[in-house]
Image (cartoon, rainbow, N blue to C red):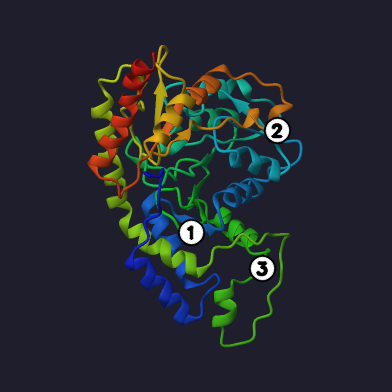
Amino acid sequence: MLPIAVPWVGEEEQRGVAEVIASGWLTQGPKVAAFEKAFAAACGTAEAVAVSNCTTALHLALIALDVGPGDEVICPSMSFIATANSIRHAGANPVFVEVDPRTYNLDPEATRRAITPRTKAIMPVHQVGMPADMDAFLAIGREHGLPILEDAACAIGSRYKGRPIGGDGVMACFSLHPRKIITTGDGGMITTNSEPLAAKLRLLRQHGMSVTDAQRHGSKQVVIESYLMVGYNYRMTDLQAAVGIAQMARLPEIISRRRHLADVYRERLASVKWIETPFVPEDTEPNFQSYPLRLKAGAPVSRLELMNHMMTRQISTRRGIMLAHREPPYAGLGLSLPVSEAASDESVLVPLYPQMTDGDVHRVCDGLESVVSRNALAS
């Protein structure tokens, strides 16, 4: 069966893990620092702070911005539920607004209309690696004195107006889950150009400890640490970072392959009139972390029928991007977001991962096209 994604873990990663085991640094140590340096360089930022996953990254970033009870953070409902949950973890309330129907990213004008005196931050999501309109959000942030915190879970390697995602907002949070562009098994990263924010994040991720494990264990004298604030156990291990360092070396190759496969999909499906391939604004370079297709009005099948048909051909698909306001923790808000709802209900994610061949893409497209002949035979 063709899966949606598989992690890319090879000999370099295995050698890095073996090195860490031999060194004894199984917890946070020099490999984490090296991975952070490589990640910051790829994003063009002064700092990168490694954590246990992207949800904890978003939570720490909000805490670092002093977001708390009674505050509001504007974000899309059309995103993995961790976006909204991280805001709730900080004690604040997510304010869901509409998305652009072409890119599925947060709508800047809808965002502007949603700002209230309680708004503490704006959290655009670079959906499935498609860069959000950051210049528009930065302008809104300046106008209202609000920080822009980027949910860049899917966006490592994507570019907006020539700039790598990760350095426009006050912070950006990335995921290193196995379904993402690169993986450390699981993990997260926060990028920022603020050294004070980076220092605060490093305290918060390790129980507020005044010195790192590397500093304490590497000292020639006894070091008695203190705990400067109420922090969290959100650290990344050196074992994970060793894998991440090797993955970073492959990042250009991985993204190049994903973009090529996206081109194959786009060219092959151009003649399928009932399918809409991803819209890519001229000033963006997405990494194609996922490949969403949208069923147009008059499509010969429903989305569920299409997904079931693909399953019979041993091809995995996933539903379109979920909507947090339809899930039980947020359903009580009583929201109606018709643009987001239509975009979610009419879209499906098809396989795209670096190990795919062009022939694999054509096999997926054959499956999509065959649903029409199947229906004709059934009628």
**Which one is in front, 85 or 352?**
352
Label 3 residue SS? loop
Q: Which residue is rendered at x = 69% and y = 79% of the image?
A: 224
- On the image, the x and y values in percent for residue 198 come to 55, 56
Q: CA distance from mark 2 to mark 1?
A: 29 Å
Q: Which residue is mark 1?
A: 185
Q: Quadrant of the N terminus?
A: top left
Q: Which residue is mark 2?
A: 328
Q: CA distance from mark 1 to mark 3?
A: 26 Å
Dot 3 alpha-carbon crowd within 10 angstroms: few under 14, some 14 to 19, many 20 or more: some
Q: CA distance from mark 2 to mark 3?
A: 37 Å
Q: Which residue is rendered at x = 54% and y = 69% of the image?
A: 28
In the figure, is residue 238 to the left or right of 213? left
**Which one is in front, 110 or 25?**
25
| Nearer the camera: disc 2 or disc 3 | 2
In the figure, is residue 16 to the left or right of 118? left
Which disc, if any, is residue 209? 3
Q: Which residue is rendered at x = 51% and y = 26% of the image?
A: 344
Is residue 107 at least partly visible in the picture? no
**Which one is in front, 207 or 88?**
88
| Nearer the camera: disc 1 or disc 3 | 1
Say if 353 sits above or below 379 in the image. Answer: below
- On the image, the x and y values in percent for residue 95 come to 65, 29
Q: Are marks 1 and 3 in contact (CB under 8 Å)?
A: no
